[in-house]
Amino acid sequence: MICLINRTLSKVCHFTKGNRLELIPISSSLTRRCCTNFDKTLHESEDSPVKSERETAEQQIRYLKRELQRLKAANASLDQMAAVRADIDKVQEKLDSLPSAVDKADKGVLLKPAKGTRDYGPEQMAVRQKVLDDIIKVFKRYGAVTIDTPIFELKEVLTGKYGEDSKLIYDLADQGGEILSLRYDLTVPFARYLAMNKISNIKRYHIGKVYRRDNPAMTRGRYREFLQCDFDIAGQYDPMLAEMECVSIAYEVLTALSLGDFRIKINHRALLNGLFEACQIDSSKFRSICSAIDKLDKEPWETVRKEMTEEKGLADNEADEIGRYIQRNGRIELVDELLNDTFLLKSQAAKTGLEDIKLFLHYCSISGIDDKVSFDLSLARGLDYYTGLIYEVVLESRRKDESVGSVAAGGRYDSLVGMFDAKKRNVPCVGISLGVERLFSVIEAKNAKEKTRVRVVDTQVYVASAQKNLVEERMKICRELRTNQINAEQPLKKNPKLLQQLQYCEDQLVPYAVIVGEGELERGVVKIRNISTREECEVPRSDLVSELKKKLQIL
Amino acid sequence: MICLINRTLSKVCHFTKGNRLELIPISSSLTRRCCTNFDKTLHESEDSPVKSERETAEQQIRYLKRELQRLKAANASLDQMAAVRADIDKVQEKLDSLPSAVDKADKGVLLKPAKGTRDYGPEQMAVRQKVLDDIIKVFKRYGAVTIDTPIFELKEVLTGKYGEDSKLIYDLADQGGEILSLRYDLTVPFARYLAMNKISNIKRYHIGKVYRRDNPAMTRGRYREFLQCDFDIAGQYDPMLAEMECVSIAYEVLTALSLGDFRIKINHRALLNGLFEACQIDSSKFRSICSAIDKLDKEPWETVRKEMTEEKGLADNEADEIGRYIQRNGRIELVDELLNDTFLLKSQAAKTGLEDIKLFLHYCSISGIDDKVSFDLSLARGLDYYTGLIYEVVLESRRKDESVGSVAAGGRYDSLVGMFDAKKRNVPCVGISLGVERLFSVIEAKNAKEKTRVRVVDTQVYVASAQKNLVEERMKICRELRTNQINAEQPLKKNPKLLQQLQYCEDQLVPYAVIVGEGELERGVVKIRNISTREECEVPRSDLVSELKKKLQIL
């Protein structure tokens, strides 16, 4: 693909593989930026073996998003930003209309994964599994067990749990029998599992894919099929002890992954509800105000205030009263101050919330994680089902104007299991969901930036041959090494070229090669080559396993 | 649930939890057996906390299946066996009609997983993950990488790949947009992935769930959602080298899992086709004859012969000619004998097949795995797409009359990828699929028989307190241990009872407990308790981490 940028036209022109020329009109600011990045773009295009129109469009969207961030940071006018947003929509529209842009086999089989989904190749999988292994290690450090539930549930299990988002649920076709839907998250199946098996306490993690018929924004890492990674504690326990474990897990995971600094924001649903109560707001409006507050991390207070008064029906003085509180954040001093706030303390709920937060912050300081934790009254969390402490972990960007956003979030939800129980028996629950897809993206970007080579195969020794007709000898050696738990590979050709064999080892970062040669065999020896230093040494054939174990530090 | 057996009525009567009495008529032989097993049954019922009618019916079916096996082994009459089969159908019918037999929440939400699916609790998951870890270790020992593909595909990707079984594919509802289906296996998505990304060689494993709207026979471990575990090698390689790796992997996995003796049966599609050719059978009949031959491991030759002549339209002499060959099995001597068989050698395909087998057996003897491998002309494999060597691994039962059946199977399929390629470019492939669900069942049964206690939590140290008000001290110790990579757990109650804490450790096979006490704290020490020996010792608080690391042999 050739990519050209026409400054005058303000368009991105590109020739697709099929030699079709296309012009996509874009804003002038993007044109400038594209020009600057032209070389880089070209280079990126050459990197990937299959560069489709889809990918090109995705790349354009990526530029536009970055542009938007820059404009925001520079306090650009709303008009300027709206123009870029319109550009994004335009390219997105093109992207959505691109099913035929991919390869099509003769029979008309479309060669693509379903919309909003993707395959993971060996390198992506290696990164993902490494991260998941690190995360699972932390879960196990806290004594968690794991469970698994089916990918689909009876539709009625999911009904009435997700509010407006229910329209995003994937249904299965009615092929006779039960009416089924793909799971939307792991929390509702967890609650169903608890109620069904009458389990009253468990500490479990669950890693599995979930499905949402959302408008995929694959450039932002938002897919229709994605992995969720949840840790939850069910059971009647003493205040804040289970919450502490959830937050500590996020703390340990982010420390283990070394992704730089992060911040843990906490708040309490009872405190928010108490604040609304103190402002004498009708309880029917609580949820919708929460969802307005939730936007404070992206929008300025003025915009949120406008939504409250114009859309959510609050009086000016009510909105201002709320605004006075929710724009505040701090640490234990702020909790103490609010615990003396007579206006707020009109509500018992507010007091309960503040006391919980105070105890939680105390436990944080005992555990030595308080440096990362801040009390932030603007944290509201979207989901309806939270009933107590809520929290969200954000990565701190090195650049002030770039936000990676939330990488973990959760809270207490004490009423969900009861929705499944005939006698409405509740099992109090608290959990944290790690945003693993976002973590993967951050790590992949970091690897790309630092040019980290990811080891994809775990081969420790490659058994190569220097001449023809040595396949049987190689086979014997492989068998011997594998029996001794050494990861050994050999070429699947009878007479491979030595250079190609060594090239493979270098490409795949295999540490050692055993080189079988006729002369050496006659003398009862084999050659061991250190791939990175290219040093070679001969060892008696009979000592091969023990020599390799020594080199590989296998005990 | 109370379970009664009425000898006179030949019925299983049982009172369900709701105190409803139900009678299920069964054959007299089952009644006898049930009476014998009555105590055992009762005991089993008490074991499980939630024993539903469904489970009871499943248990009945299990008895009936065993009865059927015994009758077969005892060469019982066809009538006797038919009677038991009818019983099975009867109970199965009841089982199918049991949606309302499970708990129902007030709102009418059915508390059950979808038909043919199940949840996996912590203990099952621990067993499954241990087995998968062992298997993955073997895959990596051969230099395999892993990939992942979405759970659903465009429907057309699956169309025309599974023959009659296509009716078992789960479709997603048409909610606007693409027409999607759940994947039926991992092989077709793999071929789609290779063709789409123009990958011409890869050695990959893929572990993932697949979906089949089959009539679930959950008692036999057949589910609608189940795990597949595939290893495949794509690429143009020298004869039998890739096949050797697939079969060696099965050999190593079964050795690692120590499930007793096993046998690897091999055959070749070209040899079978060559045999039919030599018998001058019309090539249009090849597939259907293969599927008849495939039944030889369950049915006697007479039955298969009848199917060939009466249903598949073979002449008597044709069937006998085929029968003369396919009832044979042996080792290299048989291959040599057939390589001199003038009748068979009329077909070039037969010769090619035999030569492949000869080379394969030679490689097996070089690798030292030939003791498990036998050449079996009755092996045909159901799937259409095989083109070369095929193989199947069966566990040898200690009891001659009980067969666990196939636990791994696969073969060469050189034409599947071409179905997705516009230019019909083929990528030769060979693979093996491990029957992990069956392996899990065998291991679970073995654990139950040997009363093996499965460790579910990985906690190494439980931090307990001997008196009240020590939660903060416990918290500090947990934090210290966890920071030092020790898996540490503490009760989530402020003032738990010591006995309960130690009981938890014994139940969960936690090796050590740290017991925090006021007196000890004052003297600057803590107690370490070895849970299995119940021995206790005191160590200085400052040496706690190093002492525990020593005990746990953490370097």
Image (cartoon, coloured by chain):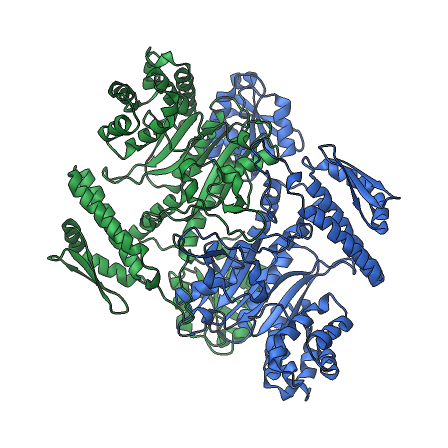
Chain colours: A green, B blue
Position of the N terminus of chain B, as image quadrant, is: top right
Front in this rendered view, residue A31 or B20: B20
Percent coordinates x, y for residue A308 in the rendering: 28, 27
Of all residues shown, which one is farthest toward the left? A8
Is residue B464 something one can see in this rendering? yes
The relative height of residue B312 versus residue A142 in the rendered view (above or below) is below
Marker count (numbered): 0
In the visual, does B437 lie left or right of A417? right
The relative height of residue B32 versus residue B386 in the rendered view (above or below) is above
Front in this rendered view, residue B450 or B483: B450
Percent coordinates x, y for residue B72 in the rendering: 81, 60
Question: What residue is drawn where x is 64% and y is 38%?
Answer: B102
Percent coordinates x, y for residue A259 in the rendering: 34, 41
Question: What residue is drawn where x is 85% and y is 62%?
Answer: B77
Is residue A455 something one can see in this rendering? no
Front in this rendered view, residue A199 or A452: A199
